[in-house]
Amino acid sequence: MTIIIARLVILLLAAGGGVAVGHALGLTSPWPFLALAGSAVGLGVLLAERGFQRVPIERIVWGGLGALFGLVLGLVLGAALEAFVPGARGPGRGLLALLLGYLGGAVALRKGEELEGLSSVLFPKVAARRDLYKILDTSVIIDGRIADISETGFLEGTLIVPQFVLRELQQIADSSDSLKRNRGKRGFDVLQKIQRIPKVKVQIHDLDFPHVREVDRKLIEVAKALGGKVITNDYNLNKVAELSGVSVLNINELANSLKPVVLPGELMHVHVLKEGKESGQGVAYLDDGTMVVVDHGKKYLGQSVDVTVTSVLQTTAGRMIFTRLREEETMPGGRG
């Protein structure tokens, strides 16, 4: 409320300033037009203030320094130009300063990545805070496991959800396909669940890149602008982000690394669910989805049995554990 009142006061002062400046310049325009012109200038300042809120402080500093350097260089070159071309005085010097000022600011902003080392020294608190930004993509929100991970407290910092990700979720939720519609609704439910976790800070960020169409590329640009990491379970986004120099936290990789380690000779208690590919085999699954192949387990379909691990095979599709029945080891002449 205080900010709204302050902005209204600024607009009123700008309107009054427009009238005062107009009279000082001897303009004959009616005062309402002068007040409107002053209000337009004030509105432009307020819009610029709102835009600067989304720009990191170091980008503002580097852009300002680059523009200042360009202006000074332009004025110096303009003064030198006047010595050779006496007619190119005020307008020539001003135009040269304006062009070089723009060039200096634009170059400084585009070289922001190369200035990150210096920025971290000059703005250590900002750099530390940005390192804790985690940008969520659409797939990881719909997946839902991010909510469970957030509840454990292992994720530090702020979870960033860009507005364009919310728009993509909305499009999925409004799809005519019932499966997509349910996935979109699940995504919104997961976000609400995360927002209700007291120790987790979620920020809906309106930083966008209209010239970029692909959502994955937008996520990478947001990560670069904020200096954060992308959380995803999308393999392609994972690879593109890494090639672009953006750090990635992949939920699938985390899940694989947390699977329990089993060694040959260990005992397990499993529930045989279906037949295996080979004759007489049974197949069971661990809680994390790992397939357990039970030799001679077909006859125990629908039952729970004790088995001994014989080998573990890691494949591109996941991990497979091969076992044999425990009772076979206790039988006379049994293996083992």
Image (tube, rainbow, N blue to C red):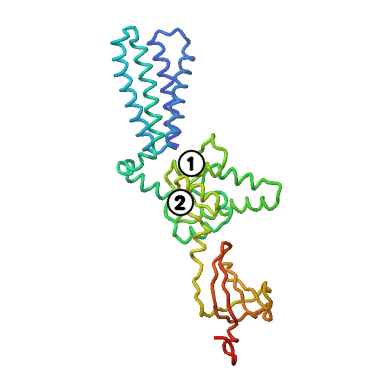
Q: Residues within 10 Å of mark 2 (few under 14, many from 20)?
A: some
- Quadrant in the picture for residue 78: top left
- Quadrant in the picture for residue 332: bottom right
Q: Is residue 42 left or right of residue 322?
A: left
Q: Amino acid at mark 2?
A: Lys
Q: Position of residue 144 (x, y in %)?
A: 56, 57
Q: Is residue 21 depicted above or below 309 in this figure?
A: above
Q: Position of residue 182 (x, y in %)?
A: 66, 53
Q: Under tag 2, what secondary structure?
A: strand
Are discs 2 and 1 less than 8 Å apart at CB? Answer: no
- Quadrant in the picture for residue 327: bottom right
Q: Which quadrant of the rendered structure holds the C terminus?
A: bottom right
Q: Earlier in the sequence, mark 2 or mark 1?
A: 2
Q: Position of residue 302 (x, y in %)?
A: 68, 77
Q: Is residue 176 left or right of residue 163?
A: right
249 or 299, which is in the foreground?
299
